[in-house]
Amino acid sequence: MDRDKLNQYLTVNTSNQISEIHLHSELDSTNAEALRLIESGKTGIHLVISDAQSAGKGRRGRTWLSPAGSGLYLSLVYPFSESADKLQALSLVTALSVHHVLLGFGAKGLMLKWPNDILLGDKKISGILLELKRANARSFVVFGIGVNYDFSDQQKLSVDRPVVDLMGILQTKPELELVAAIITGKLLQNILEFLCAGFSNFQLPWNQYDRYISSEIVIQRGGKKLIGQSKGVDETGALVIQSTNGIKRISGGEVLPSLREASEGILS
């Protein structure tokens, strides 16, 4: 990541909000480094970007493949005084921010998978991991973002699930610094809107691009599974499911394909 290029692409408003930008050639993970910054007593908003990660973190303890030059690996440290139950909706807001930017680059057909994945068909292009950290009597949220930028065919085969990269679906190749700058600016804008007005303004955009809305899905939470038809998200970001026992609102879990859809080849 070229610091001069990144600074060139960041808007004045975005730059003014960020206390410090931390660029690395390799980290264990940008989220881990962000957490270390918080523990060290850093305050304000911090942006952490690494060219590669040796132990990239995904949701539910999964590994995020992070070779140099192949992806955007970014974490944003943001002071947070709200209750922890707002993190779920913030995950959706983060995914919407990245989705909006990728569409702006001309990436057509991208859809959202609750709570925070971005897909092209059944192939993942971006994932989000939010972590809440309290240190030195202050609370922060770490917004971790991974975007598949330019994977080799061999790298794609080494991932345990179908993936797609940005370069494979765009006519022109944006510089990684530009992608990072615009995502950071959009995320900061949407975080502020969420903190001021809640999730309601994001409900319609999410449901417009929800990959599984009106489809039969399985929600897995711990060892339990709920089968029903997705009705999209409500004004709080909860996933609404029509099950045989009525309407359920889900605030945590993972979307899996229903048995019927799995038999038709639709993957989670």
Image (cartoon, grey):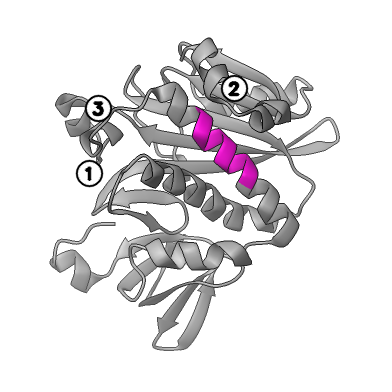
150 on left or right of 245: left
Q: Residue at x 13, y 67 (%)?
A: 264
Q: Is residue 91 above or below residue 226?
A: above
Name the amino acid type tagged 3.
Phe
Disc 2 crowd rating (10 Å Cα; few below 14, some 14-19, many 20+) is some
Q: Is residue 174 magenta?
A: no
Q: Is residue 186 magenta?
A: yes
Between 72 and 136, the one nearer to me in the picture: 72
Q: Which residue has dot 3 on it?
A: 151
Residue 56: in sight, yes or no? no
Q: Could you say where residue 164 lies in the image, as x and y percent from the top left?
A: 25, 39
Distance (Cα) linking label 2 and label 3: 24 Å
Between 1 and 231, the one nearer to me in the picture: 1
Q: Residue at x 46, y 51 (%)?
A: 116
Q: Could you say where residue 31 lies in the image, as x and y percent from the top left?
A: 56, 30
Q: Secondary structure at mark 2?
A: helix
Query: Contact, CB < 8 Å: mark 1 with mark 3?
Result: no
Q: Which residue has dot 2 on it?
A: 33
Chief secondary structure of the magenta span?
Answer: helix
The mark lying in front, picked from 1 and 3, is 3
Q: Which residue has dot 1 on it?
A: 162
Query: Contact, CB < 8 Å: mark 2 with mark 3?
Result: no
Residue 180: in sight, yes or no? yes
The range drawn in magenta is: 181-189
Q: Could you say where residue 238 lies in the image, as x and y percent from the top left?
A: 55, 68
The answer to which image quadrant residue 139 occupies is: top right
Name the amino acid type tagged 1.
Pro
121 on left or right of 90: left
Distance (Cα) linking label 1 and label 3: 12 Å
